[in-house]
């Protein structure tokens, strides 16, 4: 499992050399940031899932800074942010907007998206609060659920490995 995970994660040296992460300096050399233990990996997954839904640019930088500050797996946190990417962002943003409008008890606006700054400035007041509330609600739920599910799956995997080893030793 660890080997297959390592194939998909960013290389530690590339992350250390990334220009947007240079502000973290020597703290990127902390070995705890690169270990694949249950505690640090599960927390990295949860933080990455949280920051994936925070409606700001530089989500990877925020996830990396949180990983360094709280000492959990940095590559996992950064990789999880890519839940939201150029393909998934529009439907996720729309769903978050609708959730926020529902939570704020506002009727969703009947607008048509235009990828321009002019449109964004016109719609900011109508779209902004519902999008922020929906996105932050989704971020908290995604982080929490990711933590719980990853923790349970990790424990199940370790238990299954232990049971398999025990079964083999009883036969022999």
Image (spheres, rainbow, N blue to C red):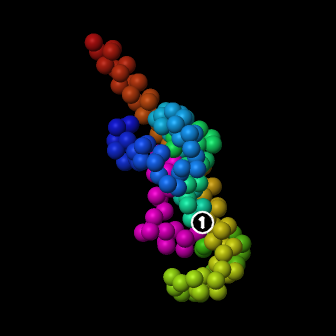
Density class for disc 1 (Cα within 10 Å; few <14, some 14-19, many ≥20) is some
Q: Which residue is at a point 49% across and 73% down the rendered structure image?
A: 90
68 sits left or right of 11 in the view: right
- Mark 1 secondary-structure assignment: loop
* Residue range of the region highlighted in magenta in the rendering: 75-96
- Please check the rendered image and state whether residue 102 is part of the magenta-colored stretch, yes or no: no
- Which quarter of the rendered picture does the N terminus lie within? top left
Q: Splitting the image into 4 quarters, where does residue 171 fall?
A: top left
Q: Main secondary structure of the magenta part?
A: helix
Q: Which residue is at a point 55% across and 71% down the rendered structure image?
A: 93
Q: Pointer 1: what residue? A: 55
80 sits left or right of 99 in the view: left
Above or below: residue 81 compared with residue 93: above
Q: Which residue is at a point 55% across and 61% down the rendered structure image?
A: 58
Q: Position of residue 91 (x, y in %)?
A: 49, 71
Q: Position of residue 109 (x, y in %)?
A: 62, 84
Q: Position of residue 104 (x, y in %)?
A: 72, 72
């Amino acid at each position: 499992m660890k080997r297959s995970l390592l194939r998909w994660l960013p290389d530690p040296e590339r992350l250390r050399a990334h220009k947007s992460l240079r502000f973290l300096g020597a703290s990127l050399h902390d070995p705890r940031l690169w270990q694949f233990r249950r505690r640090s990996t599960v927390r990295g997954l949860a933080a990455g899932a949280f920051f994936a839904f925070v409606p700001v640019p530089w989500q990877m930088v925020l996830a990396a800074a949180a990983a360094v500050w709280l000492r959990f797996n940095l590559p996992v946190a950064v990789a999880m942010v890519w839940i939201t990417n150029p393909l998934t962002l529009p439907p996720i943003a729309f769903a978050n907007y609708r959730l926020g409008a529902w939570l704020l008890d506002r009727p969703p606006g009947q607008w048509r998206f235009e990828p321009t700054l002019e449109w964004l400035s016109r719609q900011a007041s109508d779209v902004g609060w519902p999008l922020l509330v929906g996105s932050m609600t989704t971020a908290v739920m995604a982080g929490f659920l990711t933590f719980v599910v990853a923790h349970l799956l990790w424990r199940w995997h370790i238990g299954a490995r232990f049971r398999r080893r025990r079964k083999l030793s009883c036969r022999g």
